[in-house]
Image (tube, helix red, strand yellow):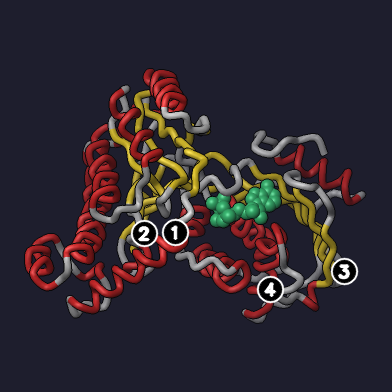
Amino acid sequence: MNASATQPISAQNVADTFATVFGYPPDGVWVAPGRVNLIGEHTDYNDGFVLPFAIDREATVAVRLRADQTARLISSYGDKKMVEVDISTLSHGTMTGWTAYPLGVVWVLAQMGVEVGGFDLYLHSTVPSGAGLSSSAAIECAVSTALNDLYGAQFSPKELVLIGQRTENEVVGAPTGILDQSASLLASDGHAVFLDCRTRESHLVPLDLSGAALRILVVDTKVTHAHATGGYAERRASCELGAQMLDVPSLRELTAAQLPEAALRLDAVTYRRVRHIVTENQRVLDTVVVLDDAGPTAIGALLTASHSSMRDDFEISCAELDLAVATALENGALGARMTGGGFGGCAIALIPEAEELKVRDAVDRAFAKANWQAPDFFTVSPGPGARRIL
Ligand code: ADP
Ligand code: MG
């Protein structure tokens, strides 16, 4: 196994590695992508709108069913040790480390009444782990797409979204919504996925970056501030309190026209949290309209307004993210914003292709001047969703 993680690799190459490891060829090869959320932050748990797109970095799995109940799993990343388990005895204690993602999917399928059987699985992922691009959902979605085919379970992509979410919530213990898996499973090349988190309805929105000579640059600040988990829980609680005080089932029900009245009924901090959610939902809707009418060149101001709202109203940005955003904007980005939960992690910048190096260089220099560790950069483009490739 000589492929280093994040290096692109062909389906045949993954199948060949599987054959070298296990001594026979796989039944097939499946992929599922990571994602970037273009706009719509912290709106998911408020029943609101999000607009992610699948990226051209994917988890690839080669799988072969076995006649017994044994699962053998190996990844090209990390310690590269084979994990072997009896899937008829899966429990929270046996689904640990990275195998919690693939085995969690098997466990959820079994809970749903699917007759699961043993398999051999080789994983190679080009989605950087823990960088906010959802490497975990990519694994879940690649595995659920593969096993759905091999077990003949016939779940729809939308049902697979919920299977991935249950894996995160019930097996891994991450209280996530359906954003990541929806992007990974429902995406299409050159499109973003508009998702209504209340109704779970979704539709594709054209996002033709290359046609407009644009790039989306992800700046991974590589910082996670200590209050990230507490801050996330605290923001969720603020949103719930705001909805309760305004007598609505969720903040999704509010529009900008109701904000002046909300200001009179809420304390100043809760009001600002509410205002972020209300204005962010509207920015997602506006982004969809602008993408349809004028194309991606015109969405920059909405991205930047989203960042200001997260910095000033929701207060989930940090110095590193603010510097990345400001420096990108000063050096030719059309728009930029932090993306993800906040308190660290990644920012995205919408950049004309010709300006990419200038922006990278400027952000690098700004971080060096601040005496911070150098950020990582990824250029991503909207790619297709989960599928069989061999
Ligand atoms: P994110 O989904 O934002 O990348 P998570 O913490 O949710 O971050 O998921 C990262 C975890 O996913 C890793 O700790 C590891 O368990 C698993 N993972 C990601 N990439 C791989 C890989 N190539 N091989 C094995 N496990 C991986
Ligand atoms: Mg994850």
Q: Are marks 4 and 3 in contact (CB under 8 Å)?
A: no
For residue 124, what is the image quadrant? top right
Residue that lies at the very extreme toward the front in this rendered image: 371
The residue carrying mark 2 is 195
Q: Is residue 59 left or right of residue 35?
A: right
The residue carrying mark 3 is 67
Amino acid at dot 2:
Leu
Q: Is residue 102 above or below residue 207?
A: below
Q: Is residue 170 left or right of residue 295?
A: right
Mark 2 Cβ inside 8 Å of ligand 2: no
* Secondary structure of residue under mark 2: strand
User: In the rendered view of the protein, which quadrant contains the N terminus?
Assistant: top right
**Of pointers 1 and 2, the one earlier in the residue sequence:** 1
Q: Are marks 1 and 2 in contact (CB under 8 Å)?
A: yes
* Secondary structure of residue under mark 4: helix
Q: Position of residue 66 (x, y in %)?
A: 85, 65
Amino acid at dot 1:
Leu
Amino acid at dot 3:
Ala
Q: Which mark is residue 226?
A: none
**Of pointers 1 and 3, the one earlier in the residue sequence:** 3
Whether residue 318 is visible: yes
For residue 82, what is the image quadrant? bottom right
The residue carrying mark 1 is 179
Q: Are marks 3 and 2 in contact (CB under 8 Å)?
A: no
Q: Position of residue 160 (x, y in %)?
A: 55, 66
- How far apart are labels 4 and 2 at the CA level? 27 Å
Amino acid at dot 4:
Trp
